[in-house]
Image (cartoon, rainbow, N blue to C red):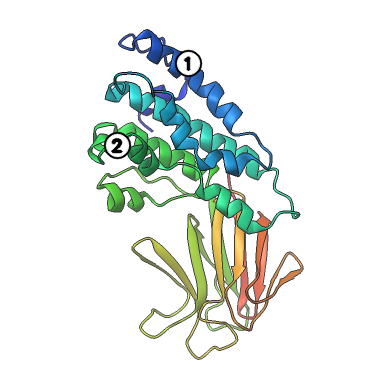
Amino acid sequence: MSSDSKSMLNPSSVASDLPSCNAVQQQALAKLPQLVQSDLPCDIRFGDNLLNSADRFRQLWLGHSEIPDDNILARAIAIHCQHCWHQWGKFIELATDDRPAQYFIETLNRIPRLNDYLDAFNLSPKFLKQQHGLVEQEYYYRNHYGDGVAAEYYEIKYGIQVTPIPSITKLKFQPNANQPSPQSHQFDFVGEISIGRQRRGEPQPTYLTSSNLHQRLIIARRDENLVSRYQMMLQRLSPNFVAITNTSEQLPLRCQSRQIPPGEQRLIKLPAVISIVMGEVYLDFQP
């Protein structure tokens, strides 16, 4: 991250660092960290509170004649972004089996992304090009606390390049010893990845494809029908929590000695091993 983006991260210094703020704006900025903390408790209300987080953030400025200038607004967004992702990291650590994986997926999806801030303040994507540190910050926090995102995402969505950082979540596929190519293959794991058997026109296994940010790991040839073409979907929720969905219509999976029937979903904490007929998928967290 650049020194400019790092300077955004200290909530206590925001108002004092911005002498161009008027008194009302300084007061609102000073309240923002407390607002975020109280808005995002680590309990069942977390998801509901996040649902309108961007709207409540915008209400800090309602009743005032003007939106603060871009630098002030960028700092406020930076604080909000930091606290949302940091709070999500604390929340997911408390995950237990009594809640379905879908609950955590839906909660994660409610965390505001940069485009939510653009919508809330009626800003164009040009704002992010002028405030490049915001993009680097979201990239950093999503990878260190959240679902992870590829650097290419920001170039595709906003036309902005960020310096790639290695994922701290790793995926390794280890074929069975009796397979033609038994050597293991390791990949950085961000976002979502579909795993299954080769489809027509796809490369030979083991191969990771990426098309418009959609990742797919091919682990078996077309004629190896003991693996489904769509065997499983892995969705990273944080560096050490993953939602696994058995997307096969017939074939079960086994993870940490628990069977996952076709169509079912589980939340798993890393490290974890997912067993299938062709071999094993290892998921690990390497801080």
Q: From this view, report whether residue 262 is shown above or below residue 15.
A: below
At x 42% / y 16%, what residue is drawn?
14
Q: Quadrant of the C terminus?
A: top right
- Quarter residue 178 falls in: bottom right
- Asked where in the image residue 90 lies, by quadrant, the reply is top right
- Element at badge 1? helix
- Give the residue at x 57% y 48%: 107
Quick check: 25 above or below 135? above
Residue tagged by mark 1?
30
Residue depicted at 32% across the width and 43% down the height: 162
Instruction: Tell me the element at label 2.
Output: loop
Distance Cα–Cα, label 1 vs label 2: 23 Å
The residue singled out by tag 2 in the image is: 122
Q: In the rendered view, tell whether residue 279 sits above or below residue 116.
A: below
The x, y position of residue 217, in whole percent, is: 48, 70
Around disc 1, counting alpha carbons within 10 Å, would you say few (fewer than 14), some (14 to 19), or many (20 or more)?
A: some
Residue extending furthest bottom? Answer: 223
